[in-house]
Amino acid sequence: QSLYEKLGKTNRTVDSELEGQIETLRDTQRKYGNILRLARALTSHFYHVVQTQSSLGECFSDLAHKSPELQEEFLYNAETQRNLTKNGQHLLAALNFFVSSINTIVNKTMEDSITTVKQYEVSRVEYDAYRSDLDYYREAPKTEVNQMKLGETESSFNAKKTEFEKLRSDVQIKLKFLDENRVKVMQKQLLLFHNAVSAYFSGNQTALEATMKQFAIKVKSPNSQPPSWMQQ
Amino acid sequence: QSLYEKLGKTNRTVDSELEGQIETLRDTQRKYGNILRLARALTSHFYHVVQTQSSLGECFSDLAHKSPELQEEFLYNAETQRNLTKNGQHLLAALNFFVSSINTIVNKTMEDSITTVKQYEVSRVEYDAYRSDLDYYREAPKTEVNQMKLGETESSFNAKKTEFEKLRSDVQIKLKFLDENRVKVMQKQLLLFHNAVSAYFSGNQTALEATMKQFAIKVKSPNSQPPSWMQQ
């Protein structure tokens, strides 16, 4: 059936509204996958920045004790790097939360709908195949064999039609809920991302901590391992 | 002579004040080498953060145009990432300037003094070797051969002594100027580093630009290549 469709030798059932929605879903998954990739890269690079700031803080602190001639200079630099390391842990926790939420929506929620879409698409091809057969036997000479075949095909067609319509309705429902869920999740996550990033890069530790609290994000200890997905 | 010294079978000329200064120089070179290594790592990781922020800004901006339902959320995030990218270029220029200055002091200025120190140390061993020979011939039975050898050794010893004292004085002068220079350079660089980092991480773009101006640092275009030393 797929082959005949590609050759243009048969006609297919088209639900252009639904197919448009499916195309949009695939496109959105691709685009959000791109956000996910970049957010992971940002988290990974930023993780290394914070680790280096921590080492630099220790290095400056050590030199402050051992260099009376530059004590003041090393001290204020050690202090700054220490503060940045501490605040950096907070931003890292927020970035990890963002990455984890986007990963769920792209690779779990959207992927689940895509799986149903694929089942629907397979079912649509089978449904159209039975429909073609049915047309064939209806227009064929009314021999006994053909009449028997027509009966068999009709019952197969009806069973497939029920399955196909069930799956179409499943897809329609899933897409509707997915879209509502997606907008809700993205609104929350994009707000978190913006507030955490803005607070951190404007040195507003109080605002950063308030954001963390608002989104119920826990900060890991400075020596915790990077997430397993992190690029090395 | 070195071997005899290690075996404790001869005595060596000791200038404990100068040797202490040399040990301090080597220690300082090691410690500043550590600052250099960490500053390079920080610059490299931060360079990748800025590159990712730039890509993320474009990604958000693209999505803002294509997602009316989340336009506002994508727009303010695009704006934030764009600003961070711009400010990040300024901090990168300051970090590169810091790295380049520390590299000069560790691998050029200090290394030049270390080379003179090495020449001085070789000369010291040779000088002590002639001194031992001289002691030997002075205490040896006064045969004609020994008297001749004594004369030869005396003249070699005096030539070596002149060279040795010249090199000792060179080292002393270099160490004194190096130390004055080092303190002056480090005061300036540590102030720059602190001011640039503090201004950037408190979102104070005006202060960051003022720091750049104060230290006459030029900002490269966003698409410029990373410095050749950068870790990939």
Image (tube, coloured by chain):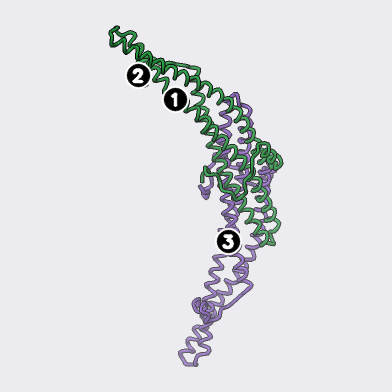
Chain colours: A purple, B green
The answer, for residue B103, to whether it is visible in the render is: yes
Q: Residue at x 50, y 22 (%)?
A: B170
Q: Residue at x 51, y 24 (%)?
A: B24
Where does label 1 land, which residue? Answer: B119
Q: State how far apart marks 2 and 1 are (Cα).
A: 20 Å
Of marks 1 and 3, the one in the foreground: 1
Q: State how far apart marks 1 and 3 are (Cα).
A: 65 Å
Q: Chain of mark 1?
A: B
A51 over A145 or under it: above or below: above
Q: Which mark is residue B4?
A: 2
> Label 1 is placed on what type of residue?
Gln
The answer, for residue A205, to whether it is visible in the render is: no
Q: Position of residue A65 (x, y in %)?
A: 58, 26
> Label 2 is placed on what type of residue?
Tyr
Of marks 2 and 1, the one in the foreground: 1
Q: Position of residue B26 (x, y in %)?
A: 49, 27
